[in-house]
Image (cartoon, rainbow, N blue to C red):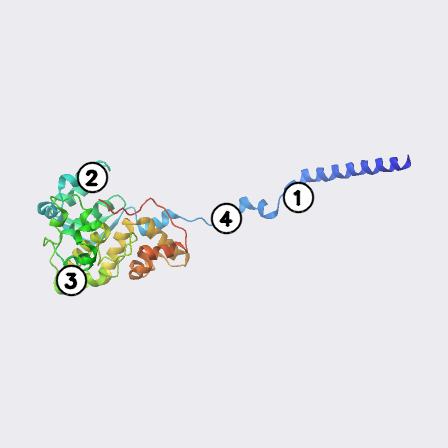
Amino acid sequence: MENQKTTNNLFSFSIMAFSVLVGGALIYGVSLKFPADFKNNEKNSETAPTFNIQGLEEKVIPEKGIELPVKWGNLGKQLIESGVIDAKKFEEIYSGRGDLSAEDKKLLYEENNGNIIINRENSGVILNLLWALGLGNKNEILENGPMTDKKYGGAGRFASTGGWTISSGDSMSHYSKHQFIVLNSKQQALVEKVSKNIYRPCCGNSTYFPDCNHGMAMLGLLELAAFQGIDENGLYKIALAANSYWFSDTYLTIAKYFQDQGIEWDKIDIQKVLGFDFSSATGYQKILSKTKPLNAGGGGSCGV
């Protein structure tokens, strides 16, 4: 009987002690119930640095665009008159993409166009115009470079040639056939030198082997810029601007990679960034192993 009484007293004491503990927990529950790092999570989320992709976009692909020191003049009109561009086919492409803007039509039809301005909205149009120029303009790179290597079965088998479906007649009837831009020997040597050092993320080839639309467009841009007196450093700057708009996700990611190392976009080695280690498909994959990709909705298509 005495043992039962003692047991009951102990049980009552346990209940009382538990009640005190629970009551204390209700009053001081936050510190008792949750670990310190969880308790401070809200504070941490407020003070943790956040990545500003919009700020990086304004450095790499500014919304207002980049004015290239290269005059377009009446090249659009020449491309139409020669048949490299069938104007009706060209416009039909954009009828399902919101139509050509007034500025786009000026580049296509008018004679006194000033410097090319490339931006987020017109980068595709600029790409196609320069593609036509690179394809149609007579140049030794097209005639004696890798495009004509017999192991590939002919220059007409590439995306940059067979994929150009908006000319009058077969695209190969215009391949390196028109003298829109006639380079002197010094200018030609410069274009060949620079073209071998500029890559594109859609493949592993340099501009010297323009087997896709981006390569052919870049060749046309380099020819036009060299013809107008742009030096080697200037050619690389122009090429980076164009590539950045054509492959915006790629170059935003590369910019983030450099930013993580404390190097801002305006301080990069442009020639290095355009080279194989960063701008080729293989090089870019290595960059992706070191940083997370950014997605601004801009990839590079190899069709018109």
Of the numbered discs 1 and 4, the one sitting upstream in the chain is 1
Give the alpha-carbon distance from disc 2 to disc 1, as whole Å. Answer: 66 Å
Q: Which residue is mark 1?
A: 32
Q: Residues within 10 Å of mark 2 (few under 14, many from 20)?
A: some
Residue 212 percent location from the top left of the image: 23, 51
Foreground mark, 3 or 1, reads 3
Residue drawn at x 75%, y 38% is 18
Is 138 displayed left or right of 126 in the figure?
Answer: left
Foreground mark, 2 or 4, reads 2
Quarter of the figure that contains the C terminus? top left
Q: Which residue is mark 4?
A: 47
Quarter of the figure that contains the N terminus? top right
Q: Secondary structure at mark 1?
A: helix
Residue 6 percent location from the top left of the image: 87, 38
The quadrant in which residue 296 appears is top left
Is residue 1 positioned above or below 176 on the image? above
Amino acid under label 4?
A: Thr
**Do the CB atoms of the residues marked 2 and 3 lie less than 8 Å apart?**
no
Amino acid under label 1?
A: Leu
Residue 180 percent location from the top left of the image: 11, 53
Residue 37 percent location from the top left of the image: 58, 48
